[in-house]
Amino acid sequence: MTQMSKIDTKTLLQDVTAFIWAEGAMLDAKEYDAWLDLWTDDGLYIMPIGDGEDYANQVNLCYDNAKMRRDRIGRFHMGFSISSAPPAQTVRTLSRFRIEAQEGAEITVTCAEHVVEDKFGRQRVWAGNVRYVLQVTEGGFKLHSKIVRLLNSDGMLNSFSYLF
Amino acid sequence: MSLDMPKFSDLDALYDEKNAQVATQMYEDPELFAEEMERIFKKTWVFVAHESEFPDKGSFKLSTVGQEPVIVVRDRKGKLHCMVNRCRHRAATVCEVKQGKTSSFQCPYHGWGYGLDGSLRALPYPEQYGDDFDKAQHGLLKLRTESYQGMVFATFNDDIEPLVDFLGSEVCRYIDLFMKQGGGFPVKVLGEHQFTVPMNWKVQLENTTDAYHFPVVHKSFMQTLDGATEEMFDFLDKGKGWVEDLGNGHSVMMMIPELEDLDANLDAPIPERFTDLAQELRDEGYPDAQVRKIVRAVGGAGFNLNLFPNVSLSLAFFRVLTPVSVDRTDIRHMALGMDGGPAAANRARIRLHEHFQGPMGFGSPDDAEVWERIQRGVQGGDDLPILVNRGLVDEEPGVAGPRGHISAETGMRAAYQMWKRMMAQ
Ligand code: FES
Ligand SMILES: [Fe+2]
């Protein structure tokens, strides 16, 4: 995209970081309807198990297209899911941002994510590597794919009542 | 610690068979837990893996038998072995890779080397052990290992009956039916979800034969299904299914009797949720009869087959429990597919698995929540019984044992009877 190439890398990194921080704040605040609006229609939200990258053909923790994302949020909202009524509270930090690629209207960004969850008076800590593909649109960035690979994703985890 | 101590002398008080009541301490007494590990998990057949996880010579996977870490491995001749992951010198684990392929196991501490069959092959500087050191006496500790329909079980008990006898003919018949979800191909493990839950292992043992909870705990899952599928999962209202005690602690929970035998009635219309998949398979050139068979298989079987003490063949996957401590249990949900089958069909099965199962599924997290609630609940009211008497009133004789309403706790009673039998020995 021509207008992209004019933007210097530092500004782009700032813009991307601000967008991802805003997304992280939405997830901590559980503003899920707003979060759904961040996505492109064909976007995929994936949490893989292990190192594999053939996500469509492997067992993942989640592999959410638009319908699965909507259903997942619906489940959180409707109050029938005991694990999300009430859900664990979370506080997350995202850091170590790197722009990996910039092609046309797509920007690939990687970063580190730490999430602390609290429920039943106990806290658990999770860490993961995140890989975003953002799409540049008239209205700002959109999430085209978000892949969160937890440390120990192929080990013993817990069940999650929130999003990474 | 032994059963001679007054505390466990009264097994009837721990499980009151007549009234079908379980004592609270069954979930929270660490000494009782230690005793269960000895008397049950060290004495019976325990599910450790599926043969498809060992495609080649040297393929291995770490597993557990009760609390004991084991390695399951295929040797050069194709035979499967299960052995304790502990060096015979000074006890270091010889393998910490979860799954992979190797030609031998070498201990990282002093370099003792073991073959794929567990035999001690070589050790550095053997002279200091003297001439009469017998390598044959220093192999990895082996467990008896037997398989049925690709399901691998191991036991520390050399005196136990053969696996097929422990399972019994009726269980084997249901395993055969379950494996029809290979759709004409061998069943293959495609991956697994793993999560740990703060609960006693018997809470899990009960749950795989508990249809009563389904419409309550899984309401939010049901609401994400299409109408016909939701109707299919509404097995409690329909009340056509049943639960049957199959002996030796095993039981079957038949939720969707139409899907007991996946080969029956293949001419029935293909459910709407699978029409796209069916078309995709036809486009790939699969003949209509095979398309019907594969698509039917993708949806999984209509029942849970619960095998005492640690695995359930649950609709479309294996649910495996590992007791960690009195109030912690690890759960594995092994996704199954068709070995050599169409990729589109396996993708469909994987997406169905992810939909319900595992840490981010629409079902498992709600299960995990209520199981943890039990462990929190038993902190209070020590003298109150846990009731597993549901459905006693209208239980009737089945093929192998009592058969109750689909929501009956017949399967739990079967498991607790076996528990009691083993704890008394
Ligand atoms: S502990 Fe294994 S070689 Fe010494
Ligand atoms: Fe459940």
Image: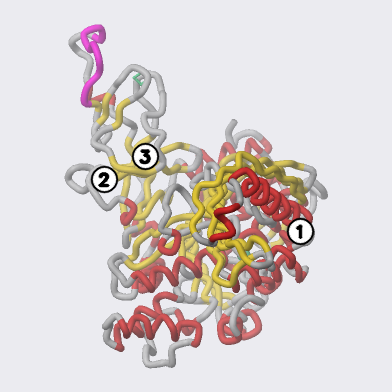
**Marks 1 and 3 share the same chain:** no
Badge 3 amino acid:
Ile
* Residue B308 visible to an observer of this rendering: no
Label 3 neighbourhood size at 10 Å, few (<14), some (14-19), many (20+)? many
Residue A60, given in percent of the width and then of the height, sits at 50, 58
Element type where label 3 sits in the image: strand
State how far apart marks 1 and 3 are (Cα): 43 Å
Q: Name the residue under label 1.
A: A30
Q: Residue at x 41, y 28 (%)?
A: B93
Element type where label 2 sits in the image: strand
Q: Name the residue under label 2.
A: B74
Q: Nearer the viewer, residue A65 or A100?
A: A100
Q: Nearer the viewer, residue B316 or A136?
A: A136
Between circles 1 and 3, the one closer to the viewer is 1
Q: In this view, does B290 lie to the left or right of A69?
A: left
Q: Mark 3 points at which residue?
A: B71
Instruction: Tell me if residue B307 is in the magenta stretch.
Output: no
**The residue carrying mark 2 has its beta carbon less than 8 Å from ligand 1:** no
Badge 2 amino acid:
Arg
Disc 2 + disc 3, Cβ < 8 Å: no
